[in-house]
Amino acid sequence: MAKPYAKTKHAEALVALTRRLRKTNPKYPKIREDMLQKNAGEIGEETVMRELEKLKLPHKFYIFHNLSLYSDTSFQMDILLISPYYALILEVKNISGEIEIETNPSMLVYTKPTGEKKSINSPVPQLEDYIYQLSQLFQRYKINIPIYGVITFAFAKSYVKKVPTNSVFLLTNELRKFIRSINTEKQFLSEEELDKLKSWLLRKNNEYNSLPLSKHYAIDPHDIVTGVECPSCGYIGMKKIRRNWACPNCREFSKHAHEKTLKDFFLIYKETINNQECRRFFHLQDKHDATRILMNPKLIKSGKSRSTKYTMTY
């Protein structure tokens, strides 16, 4: 794997924001829906990547998860496979129920097991655009290789009733057979050129940064619930006592509960933190307690005295 499966920070941040955003905020329903869709997508991508780990081919190849590139515009491919003979883009969907791909206008309509009908953007024009963007990028750098695309439904719980005949739709268990069937009569790249292409793609990868999510969704920071979250029961508002955090809800103690809360701060609240902000977010009275939290090895310190602030490295 040139770029193995990894859960995105955006997905992690959506979970944190859904936990901490006040339910009265008018944007809460949309954010919760975004979180559910994003998590479903990540589960689907992980499943497909695990299947591709079993792939054996008689030639060298590399696989990338969540590769973000820039051509005419920024675009992010769920999965990209490159070989000396072709490049293959996989657009992964994790949807339950009966699925119909409509055209003119393009949309994916699905009926949930409950009978509820929903529609989302069709993956067909999306995949076509990815193929176009990647081909433009390759042409610009004189990389001459055919590019194919497949829309993959991660699980058999997707019943695909109607699809366009000019696109390829597969379930995960059909992928390896399909890839083995792709024409490899003409070799476009040597193994050395393929290695260079792999390194080049990794250098070009530039993941979209949506953090902190309060800024991304234009949320008033006052609508975000502050405090240390209990790792046992999920209650937000643990109390600092000596070298521990105590949960008033379940009576459990934790020495390290603040670490997740510190990450939440950067994921959803603000790009930088100072001692005063730390005390406010963690419900602390003592500035020395805040200083100890900010001595985390994942934080980068800048400034001096009262202007000292910290940023997090992921």
Image (tube, grey):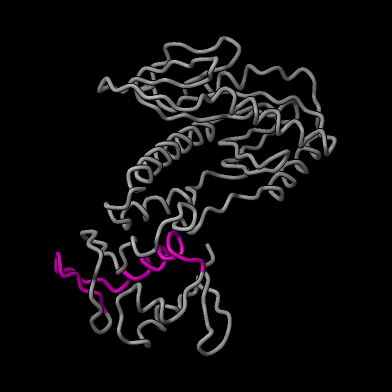
Q: Find residue 250 and report its image quarter.
A: bottom left
154 in magenta = no
Does 45 sit left or right of 205 as displayed? left
Of 60 and 203, the residue lying toward us = 203
Residue at the right extreme, as displayed = 142
Extent of the magenta region: 244-271
Q: Find residue 226 and report its image quarter.
A: bottom left
Does 304 sit left or right of 219 as displayed? right
Residue at (44%, 57%) from the top-left corner?
214
250 in magenta = yes
Residue at (35%, 25%) from the top-left corner?
96
Residue at (30%, 84%) from the top-left corner?
285
Q: Position of residue 72 (x, y in %)?
A: 73, 38
Q: Where 157 sits versus 260, above or below?
A: above
Q: Position of residue 69 (x, y in %)?
A: 67, 43
Residue at (25%, 64%) from the top-left corner?
236
Of 20 and 140, the residue lying toward us = 20
Of 199 and 71, the residue lying toward us = 71
Q: Where 60 sits versus 172, above or below?
A: below
